[in-house]
Image (tube, grey):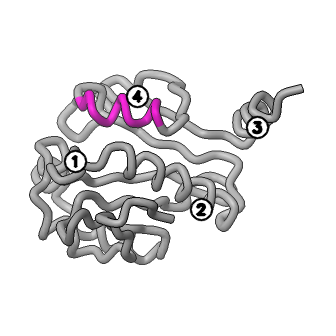
Amino acid sequence: MVTNKDVKAIPFHWTHPYHMDLRPFDRALFHNLPDFGRRLRAYAAENTGRTLLHKGQMACSWGAISLWPGVAEFWLITAYQFERIPITATRTAIRYFNQVELEMKLHRLQIVVDMQNEVAMRWAAALKFKPEGRLYSYGPDGSDHMMFARTLNERIIQNTKDAGP
C-alpha cells in the first residue's frame, strides 16, 4: 500500500491523534466537538482506519465510517508531518479508497471539508473527489463546508476514459 520507504501505514488507534503535532484545523476539532474522543473510538471500532508514519512520526490518520449500506464518509486528521509527504500520502490514500470501496461494497464515498482549510480542499480534488455543493453554517463553529464525493458511476466513467479506444 505504501511505496515510500520512509512511510509506513499502521492500523488506526483512537489515541493516535492525541500524540500528533496537529495542524490548526485538526486541533480545533478537540475544542469544537466536546465528544471528539467518543468519535475517535467509533472511528477505531470501524476497523478501516490507518495512521501514516513518516520516519516514525505520525503524519495523519484516516478511515471510512459507514453511514448505511453502500455509502461511507472518509475522515482525516493531519499533523504538520503530513506536509512532508504529500505525494506519498495522496498515492496511498487513493489505493486505500480503491481497497475500502471494494471491501465495504461502496457506491459512494464522501468527504466534508471546511472551506477555509485550503490544504484539505486541494487534497480532496487531488484524490479525485468531485465537489457537490456548499454546506452553509455546517461546522460546529458555524463555518461553511464543501461536500465532495467519489461515486461508482464516476469511477466507471474515469476507468473507461483511462482505457482509451
Q: Amino acid at mark 1?
A: Arg
Q: Specify the label residue 100 is tagged with.
A: 2
Task: Choose between 125 and 148: the one closer to the eye.
Answer: 125
Disc 4 and disc 3: Cα gap in Å?
A: 25 Å
Look at the image and tell me whether residue 27 can be seen: yes
Of the residues shown, which amino acid type is indicated by label 2? Val
Q: Is 97 situated left or right of 7 in this image?
A: right
Instruction: Classify mark 1: helix, strand or loop.
Output: helix
Taking the magenta stretch, the answer to whether it contains residue 149 is no
Residue at 14 percent across and 46 percent down: it is 23
State yes or no: discs 2 and 4 in contact (Cβ < 8 Å): no
x then y, percent, for residue 124: 43, 35
Residue density around tag 3, few if under 14, some if 14–19, many if 20 or more, within 10 Å: few
Based on the displayed image, in which of its 4 quarters is residue 83 positioned? Answer: top left
Is residue 120 within the magenta segment? Answer: yes
Picture coordinates of residue 17, whole percent (x, y)? 20, 65
- For marks 1 and 3, give the CA distance: 30 Å
The residue most toward the front is 5
Q: Helix or strand or loop: what does disc 3 sit on? A: helix
Give the left or right position of residue 94, taking residue 120 as reference.
right
Three-letter amino acid code at disc 4?
Met
**Front residue (pair 82, 27):** 82
Which residue is pictured at 30% across the width and 77% down the height?
13
111 over 41 or under it: above or below:
above
Q: Main secondary structure of the magenta part?
A: helix
Q: Which residue is mark 3?
A: 159
Residue at image point 54% right, 25% down: 132
The residue at 58%/47% (across/down) is 109
Q: Quick one: label 1 or label 4, which is nearer the N terminus?
A: 1
> Neighbour class for label 4 at 10 Å: few (<14), some, many (≥20)?
some
Spatial separation of the CA atoms under disc 1 and disc 4: 25 Å
Circle on res. 84: 1
